[in-house]
Amino acid sequence: MANKIKLADIFASKTQAKIIKFFVENSRQEYYQTELCVKLKESLGSVQYELERLVRVGFLNLNRTKTRTYYSLSSNFKLLKEFEAILKKVKKWIAVHFADPV
């Protein structure tokens, strides 16, 4: 039997994998940090750290208002199509080999 592979196994951390997956699947909206913590069920510190890293590499855009900092997927990210393809392939593979989702 094949080993179970999750998206988190490919990326630097589980939180990073969750954020990338979330934004690829929800690319048309902005989200603020606390909202992402709740949706991803991750701590504020780990979400903040990964958001900063993903902004630095150009995966996410940053939009600051007086009260909140919003993040959105950068449509100009050079590897976006590849990330989308990887996510699609991983989901398809898991659907074939395992019952639970990524």
Image: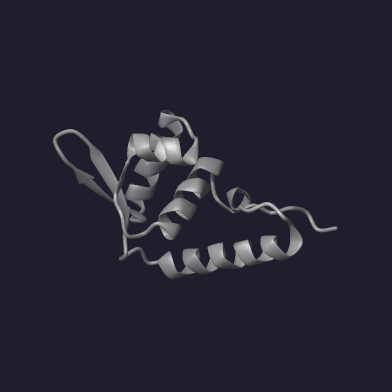
Q: Is residue 31 left or right of residue 79?
A: left
The outermost residue toward the front is 99
The total number of labels drawn is 0
Please say whether residue 79 is visible from this viewpoint. Answer: no
- Examine the rendered structure and indicate whether residue 89 appears above or below residue 55: below
Q: Position of residue 75 (x, y in %)?
A: 32, 65
The outermost residue toward the right is 1
Q: Quadrant of residue 77?
A: bottom left
Q: Is residue 34 left or right of residue 64?
A: right
Q: Residue at x 36, y 38 (%)?
A: 35
Q: Position of residue 53 (x, y in %)?
A: 39, 44
Position of the N terminus, as image quadrant, is bottom right
Looking at the image, what colour scheme do you see?
one colour
Q: Residue at x 81, y 58 (%)?
A: 2
- Examine the rendered structure and indicate whether residue 26 appears above or below residue 71: below
Comparing 59 with 18, the one in front is 18
Please say whether residue 72 is visible from this viewpoint. Answer: yes
The outermost residue toward the left is 66
Comparing 54 with 29, the one in front is 29
Q: Is residue 27 left or right of residue 98?
A: left
Q: Residue at x 36, y 59 (%)?
A: 27
Q: Position of residue 38 (x, y in %)?
A: 43, 35
Q: Position of residue 36 (x, y in %)?
A: 39, 40
Q: Is residue 69 left or right of residue 97?
A: left
Q: Residue at x 26, y 44 (%)?
A: 70
Q: Quadrant of residue 45?
A: top left
